């Protein structure tokens, strides 16, 4: 069964896109079952940066009920990226930190 995109509320579109970005970033950080087989930190950086922009820009529009879990997932990915990096970024320079500020575990 398919739905017409015109019938889908914005909050649902935003959260769905965010979940897809999170899932892809997790795989690229090496967090999938296959681990390092799909690990690509350059790709992960791009996905996390895009996710941070989306979450930050939409948080006031989608409300804290929806934004809070997205922020938590984003932070987890940022920390996983930092842990997976051989040469860690300076605080505030990691993926998405332009939008979120420095992420500290």
Image (cartoon, rainbow, N blue to C red):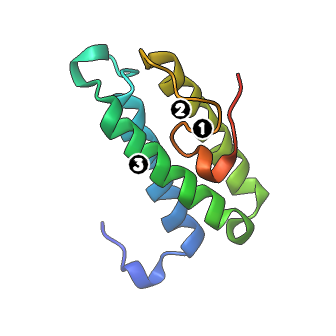
Mark 1 neighbour class, 10 Å CA radius: few under 14, some 14 to 19, many 20 or more: some
- Residue drawn at x 53%, y 28% is 89
Q: Is the N terminus in the top left, top right, bottom left or bottom right quadrant?
A: bottom left
Separation (CA) of disc 3 from disc 1:
12 Å
Whether residue 72 appears in this view of the structure is yes
- Residue drawn at x 63%, y 66% is 58
- Residue drawn at x 71%, y 26% is 104
Q: Is residue 93 left or right of residue 32?
A: right
Report x, y in % for residue 23.
41, 39
Separation (CA) of disc 2 from disc 3:
13 Å
Q: Is residue 53 left or right of residue 37?
A: right
Q: Which mark is drawn over residue 77?
A: 2
Q: Is the C terminus in the top left, top right, bottom left or bottom right quadrant?
A: top right
Residue at the far bottom: name it.
6
Query: For this rendering, which residue is in front, 47 or 26?
Result: 47
Query: For this rendering, which residue is in front, 65 or 60?
Result: 60
Nearer-N-terminus badge (2/3): 3
Report x, y in % for residue 80.
52, 23
Q: Which residue is mark 3?
A: 20
Foreground mark, 2 or 3, reads 2
Query: For this rendering, which residue is in front, 21 or 100?
Result: 100
Separation (CA) of disc 2 from disc 1:
6 Å
- For label 1, the SS is helix
Q: Are marks 2 and 1 in contact (CB under 8 Å)?
A: yes
- For label 2, the SS is helix
Residue at the far front: name it.
90
Q: Quadrant of residue 59?
A: bottom right
Q: Which residue is mark 1?
A: 73
Q: Quadrant of residue 32?
A: top left
Report x, y in % for residue 70.
62, 47
Residue 27, compared with residue 37, is above or below; it is: below
């Amino acid at each position: 069964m398919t739905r017409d995109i015109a019938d889908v509320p914005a909050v649902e579109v935003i959260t769905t896109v965010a979940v897809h970005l999170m899932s892809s970033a997790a795989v690229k950080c090496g967090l999938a079952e296959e681990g390092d087989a799909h690990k690509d930190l350059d790709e992960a950086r791009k996905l996390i940066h895009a996710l941070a922009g989306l979450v930050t820009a939409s948080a006031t529009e989608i409300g804290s009920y929806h934004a809070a879990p997205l922020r938590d997932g984003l932070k987890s990915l940022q920390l996983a990226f930092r842990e997976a990096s051989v040469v860690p970024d300076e605080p505030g320079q990691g993926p998405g930190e332009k939008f979120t500020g420095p992420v500290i575990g």
